[in-house]
């Protein structure tokens, strides 16, 4: 769906002279359509100014992900995680708890690690989003990823992309962490397979290298 | 999650007028770490979300002679990093760093932390704040209540107040500021938390179309404060008991004391009994123990949470001794 035109001002959705829009007509006559209907925002008056109200239907949105521009028409209820995975085929961030409780969906938003399952796509529009996909450059693993391989820090691998992103962000902020820093700073990611010792080795190795 | 409409006002006045005058149809979206989970589980089903993050003057922290003003949208991560917070309110910085995980602290705001809804599993399963079965029988008293209240639980509210930052903010004497259709108001932070008596009440003194705009902590040059939490897991979980203590000393004696517990009652629980037990006394192991006993004297545990009484006592005593020995950090 990258760079497609969401066609926000769909002329078919404007009221005709009878005052009944095509959409109202479809609702009235009970016909359902497969094409997504994208409405322009409804303007409401708030404290003397016009404010756009988006949705509940699809809204044209634009994103900056891994330095590239993406566009899609999404409902306001779509989370950033679901937009990444289902619209842009960036499936590195995983959906596990979907409740801010496991870390598998960790991405960077303006360089800070956050849970993509707990942010709405619509509010992520003007942020720089970085996913695990951006860490591998020209087929070469990021040093943190390489270290996950060498230090046996992955078993089933489901928590790994989130952990890799969290480790990278942690090391950027704490290049020489204490053991306590590591335990606190990486507490937002859970691993069902118990690879925590391997991940501690990753951090130790990276800190030694001064990465 | 059910469909909703979304609006991002850029001023407080706009936000207030976009919110409904009754609970149910509209909700404020700040960091979303609590709100979205409640919506995914159908605990709340708003028709409109009002995202307040575009309102510039709700962001940021500033210091003045009146103390520290923390804008409602300050994230917990930024708050713990402010030099003024670390230097003058170290017990607050420590409490903030204990919250959840780095990812949550990067998203969660202080306003959202004060307004987050209880973690009571009956509430989170859609059974309401004061859960009852069809016959009107209260569910918590005879149910799964091991994490529920041990104080202030005489009425139908048995959940515990969920913020672990609020007790130390109250101990420091903080105020909360709100803005709504009838203008601005300010109240002592402890007055913001209320025990609901009916299902239509909320646990906050917050009107549906009011927003929390800031928290103000007074200067505390002569205060020794500390925060102590007891958790089953060290991080990324909610605690079992929290205590926050602020002492004003006269030599080695306490001139005055504030003792506030969290996770023990439906509201943050300031203990006048513990404060009395310390006032005018030297602060040591024996008086700390006596104050802790006093703090829990009126506890009435439910059938599965008597263990929390001892945990809360230990938290209070350790917070007192930590405060006396120089405070947190
Ligand atoms: C795994 C996990 C562990 C956690 N552990 C802890 C912990 O140890 N200690 C702790 O204190 N918290 C803990 N939390 C809770 C977390 O701190 C809160 O979810 C967070 O602070 C809420 O802030 P937010 O900005 O994301 O609020 P949102 O989710 O956006 O909003 C929460 C509620 O507050 C309302 N609201 C938000 N801002 C305002 C405002 N300015 N005015 C009026 N109403 C407003 C919203 O409408 C909503 O009802 C934990 C959460 C998770 C998921
Ligand atoms: S899927 Fe987002 S934290 Fe678990
Ligand atoms: S490797 Fe399996 S969950 Fe972490």
Image (cartoon, helix red, strand yellow):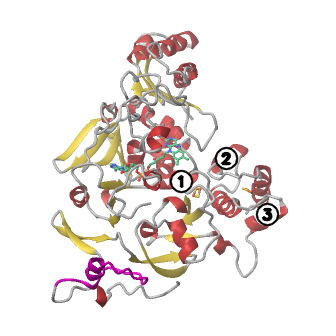
Q: Quadrant of the C terminus of chain B?
A: top right
Going from N to C along the chain, the mark reached first, 1 or 3, is: 1
Find residue B161 and report its horizontal and vertical position in percent.
43, 34
Give the distance between the C-alpha atoms of the residues marked 3 and 2, in whole angstroms: 19 Å
Residue at mark 2: chain: A
Question: Which residue appears at 67% of the width and 62% of the height?
Answer: A168
Find residue A204 and report its horizontal and vertical position in percent.
78, 54
Give the distance between the C-alpha atoms of the residues marked 1 and 3, in whole angstroms: 29 Å
Q: Which residues are magenta?
A: A19-39
Report if the beta carbon of the residue with label 1 is closer than 8 angstroms to ligand 2. yes
Q: Which residue does the numbered mark 3 point to in the structure image?
A: A147
Count up the numbered dots.
3
**Helix, strand or loop at mark 3:** helix
Residue at mark 3: chain: A
**Helix, strand or loop at mark 2:** helix
Q: Which residue does the numbered mark 1 point to in the structure image?
A: A99
Residues tagged 3 and 2 counted as in contact (Cβ below 8 A): no
Q: Are marks 1 and 3 on the same chain?
A: yes
User: For residue A26: magenta?
Assistant: yes
Give the distance between the C-alpha atoms of the residues marked 1 and 2, in whole angstroms: 25 Å
Going from N to C along the chain, the mark reached first, 1 or 2, is: 1
Q: Nearer the viewer, mark 3 or mark 2?
A: 3
- Asked whether residue B278 appears in the rendered view, the answer is yes
Q: Which residue does the numbered mark 2 point to in the structure image?
A: A181
Find residue B274 and report its horizontal and vertical position in percent.
44, 16
Is A203 placed above or below B154 here?
A: below
Query: Which picture quadrant has residue B16?
Result: bottom left
Residue at mark 1: chain: A
Q: Nearer the viewer, mark 1 or mark 3?
A: 1
Is B190 placed above or below A180 here?
A: above
Residue B186 placement, left or right of B242: left
Is B125 placed above or below B266 here?
A: below
């Amino acid at each position: 769906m990258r760079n497609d035109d969401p066609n926000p001002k769909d002329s078919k959705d404007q009221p005709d002279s009878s005052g009944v829009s095509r959409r109202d007509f479809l609702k009235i006559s009970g016909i359902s359509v497969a094409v997504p209907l994208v409405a322009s925002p409804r303007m409401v008056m708030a404290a003397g100014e016009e404010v756009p109200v988006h949705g509940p239907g699809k809204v044209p949105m634009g994103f900056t992900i891994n330095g590239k521009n993406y566009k899609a028409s999404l409902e306001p209820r779509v989370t950033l995680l679901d937009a990444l995975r289902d619209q842009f085929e960036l499936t590195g961030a995983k959906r596990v708890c979907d409740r801010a409780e496991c870390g598998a969906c960790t991405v960077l938003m303006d360089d800070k690690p956050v849970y993509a399952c707990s942010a709405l796509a619509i509010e992520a529009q003007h942020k720089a989003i970085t996913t695990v996909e951006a860490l591998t450059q020209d087929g070469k693993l990021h040093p943190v990823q390489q270290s996950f391989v060498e230090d046996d820090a992955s078993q089933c691998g489901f928590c790994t992309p989130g952990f890799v992103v969290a480790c990278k962000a942690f090391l950027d902020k704490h290049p020489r962490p204490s053991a306590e820093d590591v335990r606190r700073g990486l507490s937002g990611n859970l691993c069902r397979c118990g690879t925590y010792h391997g991940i501690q080795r990753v951090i130790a190795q990276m800190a030694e290298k001064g990465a | 999650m059910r469909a909703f409409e979304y609006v991002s006002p850029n001023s407080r006045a706009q936000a207030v007028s976009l919110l409904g005058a009754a609970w149910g149809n509209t909700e404020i979206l700040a960091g979303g770490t609590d709100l979205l989970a409640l919506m995914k589980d159908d605990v709340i089903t708003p028709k409109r979300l009002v995202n307040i993050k575009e309102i510039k003057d709700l962001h940021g922290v500033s210091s003045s002679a009146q103390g520290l003003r923390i804008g409602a949208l300050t994230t917990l991560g930024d708050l713990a990093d402010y030099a003024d917070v670390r230097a003058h309110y170290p017990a607050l910085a420590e409490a903030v760093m204990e919250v959840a995980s780095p990812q949550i602290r990067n998203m969660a705001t202080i306003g959202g932390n004060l307004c987050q809804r209880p973690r009571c599993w009956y509430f989170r399963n859609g059974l309401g704040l004061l859960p009852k079965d069809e016959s009107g029988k209260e569910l918590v008293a005879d149910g799964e209540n091991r994490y529920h209240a041990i104080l202030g639980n005489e009425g139908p509210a048995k959940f515990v107040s969920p913020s672990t930052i609020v007790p130390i903010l109250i101990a420091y004497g903080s105020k909360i500021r709100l803005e709504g259709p009838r203008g601005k108001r300010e109240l002592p932070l402890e007055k913001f938390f209320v025990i609901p008596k009916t299902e239509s009440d909320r646990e906050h003194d917050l009107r549906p179309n009011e927003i929390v705009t800031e928290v103000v902590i007074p200067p505390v040059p002569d205060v020794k404060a500390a925060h102590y939490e007891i958790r089953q897991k060290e991080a990324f979980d909610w605690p079992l008991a929290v205590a926050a203590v602020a002492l004003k000393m006269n030599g080695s004696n306490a001139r005055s004391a504030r003792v506030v517990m969290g996770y023990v009652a439906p509201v943050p629980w300031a203990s006048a009994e513990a404060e009395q037990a310390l006032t005018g006394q030297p602060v040591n192991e024996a008086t700390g123990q006596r104050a802790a006993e006093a703090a829990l004297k009126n506890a009435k545990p439910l059938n599965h949470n008597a263990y929390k009484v001892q945990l809360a006592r230990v938290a209070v005593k350790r917070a007192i001794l930590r405060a006396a020995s120089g405070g947190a950090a």
